[in-house]
Image: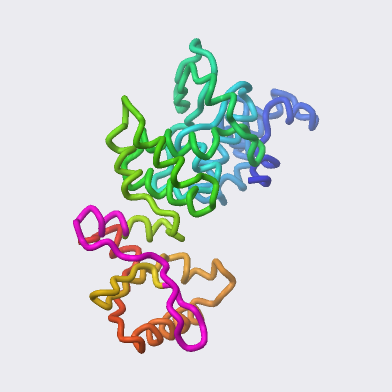
Amino acid sequence: MEHLFETVKTSVELRHLGKSTSGVSRECARGELFKIGHNAYIKTALWESLSNTDRCLAGHVAFMKTNRGYVLSHVSAALWGGAPVLRLPHKIWVSHPHDSVKSRGRVQVSRNRQKECDSAVFHRGARVTSPLQTVIDCARTLPIIDALCIADYFLHCRLVDYEVLSQHLRELSGRGVCTAREVARLMSMKAESPLETVARYWILTWGLAPPVEQVPLWVGGRTLRPDFLWEKERVILEVDGKVKYAGTFGEAAEDVVQNERRRQHELESLGYTVVRALWEDIVVHPE
């Protein structure tokens, strides 16, 4: 996030760097600068190198650097906090304490939120709603699976207390109350990835027997924690996200695959049937 704050420049910052308004316009015309928002710019080459997520975050940076008094909220606060967002927001979601401000263009404003703005926290260079408020807002406004991934993330990171969140979600009234109560029913502190959250969503909503998550099993001199375990049926479900095989954690893909095979063999040696599912299995065609 820090590099985005450094690379997204406001008109004022560019002027302090010695660039005139006409000079900025000429650089934009030559394709050297890209106008990312009102009075906010980024070098075109850098913009083209950014991922979709970083482009979305850069748009948020541009807005927050050029608008005072707003607080990032809802899905924008979740994205800013590092939560897994299944669908990047097409708008920047913010809250404001006053009733006079209005939504415009790509900015969705929740007005008259004095209490929520007063309890906002400063995180990674911007004011955002508290983790508890962020989850509540997402549960009111997002599809169940999207909100559930965000709730699980904040719970797993110990940024929100499970009982406190559950109580708040169950006591809500008005818009989004049905989704919020479903999130309260389905959420878990044990999900280590959004794929585990989505898998649990299908397991529970389809009426399958609830599994035990991340239960420790001692095998081969080490402790393994399978994603989902049905002890009575002696069945284990392991879900594999794409990130495991992309070298994200510093391991070569072939090493990760070998470790997964060893893990499966060790679990099967205990008498379990191990079922493996990939991202495509669970997200694209979960049936």
**Residue most extreme to the top:** 100
In the drawing, does residue 47 fall left or right of residue 242? right
Can residue 225 be spotted in the picture? Answer: yes
Tell me which corner region of the image, top left, top right, bottom left or bottom right, holds residue 235.
Answer: bottom left
Residue 80 in picture, x, y percent from top left: 55, 41
Q: Is residue 196 above or below residue 153?
A: below
Residue at 42% across, 35% down:
136
Q: Nearer the viewer, residue 25 or 124?
A: 124
Q: Nearer the viewer, residue 213 or 255?
A: 213
Can residue 29 be spotted in the picture? Answer: no
Residue 48 in picture, x, y percent from top left: 55, 48
Question: Which residues fall within the magenta stretch?
Answer: 200-225
Residue at 45% across, 20% down:
103
Tell me which corner region of the image, top left, top right, bottom left or bottom right, holds residue 146.
Answer: top left
Residue at 31% across, 32% down:
177
Residue at 45% across, 85% down:
219
Residue 131, magenta (yes or no)? no
Q: How is the image coloured?
A: rainbow
Residue 192 in picture, x, y percent from top left: 46, 60
In the drawing, does residue 156 fall left or right of residue 62? left
Tell me which corner region of the image, top left, top right, bottom left or bottom right, holds residue 125.
Answer: top right
Q: Is residue 61 above or below residue 225?
A: above
